[in-house]
Image (cartoon, grey):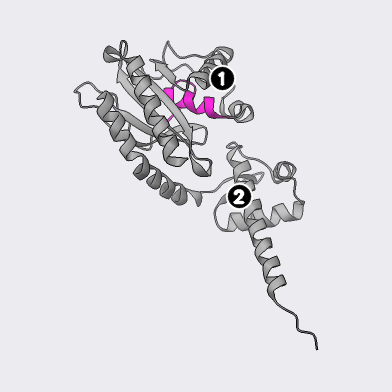
């Protein structure tokens, strides 16, 4: 009589389950790179899996509301079921990074913002306001564009060339007379930000408000930025001090997650 162990089949099932999760995660990452939507055929080409496999995984993700299929052509987008998960992650990030924001706030005595990179926009998730009557503040949850904000340009500098191309709109709208609308000029500035680690907004998003910002990649590929917005009257003359303090806190955060 031959006795067959169930260990091998159990291991195969476990390995197959892990593989499905990895493939589903890859599909979600591809959809993240296409906020305008992508067809199932395009997704199949990018993920390089059999069409039947992609359709099966996408169907399960749609059922769990992690992917949305939008009429009339059924283009695929990240689903609203991800929002509660993202909110939970943001909550953890806010809690972990709050001491660093407080240190920076005490160091520079100005407003300090924490933002995440969401759908090719700057999304504010935490803030400590300046202890001055004249202060620069933004509401939590508000989204700002990338090309004319310090934290947005810091995000752009942290992206790969392909992601950077996807993130920038073909036309860069001017929000103030100081906004850079020339794509070549902006790309040159982004290259400089990569070298220096600090991005600047000199009244490019809002007249009378300037800022410094820096971005960092956290575990699980989450991209966050810290910025210090300051009214024009106080900014010039202290921008170097702000940049130095921001570099210090970003290095502390890198060491925290190392």
Res 61 visible: yes
Exactly how many numbered labels are in the figure? 2
Residue 125 falls left or right of residue 56: left
Give the residue at x 52% y 32%: 120
Kindly identify the residue that appears in the image at 60 percent across and 29 percent down: 160
Per the rendering, the mark at residue 93 is none
Span of residues in magenta: 144-159
Q: Position of residue 3 (x, y in %)?
A: 76, 84
Front-most of residues 72 and 19: 19
Residue 53, compared with residue 257, is above or below; it is below
The first of marks 2 and 1 along the sequence is: 2
Name the residue tied to disc 1: 171
Magenta-span inclusion, residue 213 = no
Q: Mark 2 highlights which residue?
A: 25
* x and y, in percent, of residue 69 in the image: 61, 48
Are the residues tagged 2 and 1 within 8 Å (C-beta)? no
The N terminus: image quadrant: bottom right
Tag 2, which secondary structure?
helix
* Quadrant hosting residue 186: top right
Residue located farthest toward the bottom when viewing the structure as drawn: 1
Instruction: Judge whether residue 70 can be spotted in this image.
Output: no
Is 191 left, or right, of 15 in this rendering?
Answer: left
Task: Specify few, some or many for label 2: CA neighbours under 10 Å numbering under 14, 14-19, or 20 or more.
Answer: few
């Amino acid at each position: 009589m031959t006795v067959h162990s169930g260990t091998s089949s159990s291991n195969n099932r476990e390995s197959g389950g892990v593989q499905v999760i990895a493939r589903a995660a890859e599909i979600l990452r591809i959809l993240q790179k296409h906020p305008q939507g992508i067809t199932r055929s395009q997704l199949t080409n990018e993920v390089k899996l059999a069409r039947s496999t992609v359709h099966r995984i996408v169907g399960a993700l749609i059922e769990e509301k992690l992917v949305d299929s939008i009429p009339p052509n059924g283009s695929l987008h990240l689903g609203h079921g991800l929002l509660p998960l993202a909110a939970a992650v943001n909550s953890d990030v806010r809690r972990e990074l709050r001491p660093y924001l407080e240190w920076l706030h005490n160091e520079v005595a100005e407003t300090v913002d924490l933002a995440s990179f969401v759908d090719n926009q700057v999304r504010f998730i935490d803030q400590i306001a300046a202890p001055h009557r004249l202060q620069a503040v933004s509401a939590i949850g508000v989204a700002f564009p990338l090309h004319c904000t310090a934290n947005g340009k810091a995000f752009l500098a942290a992206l790969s060339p392909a992601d950077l191309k996807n993130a920038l709109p073909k036309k860069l709208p001017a929000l103030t007379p100081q906004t850079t609308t020339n794509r070549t000029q902006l790309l040159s500035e982004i290259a400089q930000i990569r070298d220096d680690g600090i991005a600047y907004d000199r009244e490019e998003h809002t007249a009378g408000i300037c800022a410094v910002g820096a971005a960092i990649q956290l575990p699980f590929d989450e991209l966050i930025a810290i910025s210090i917005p300051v009214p024009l009257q106080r900014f010039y003359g202290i921008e170097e001090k702000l940049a130095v303090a921001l570099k210090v806190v970003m290095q502390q955060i890198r060491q925290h997650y190392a």
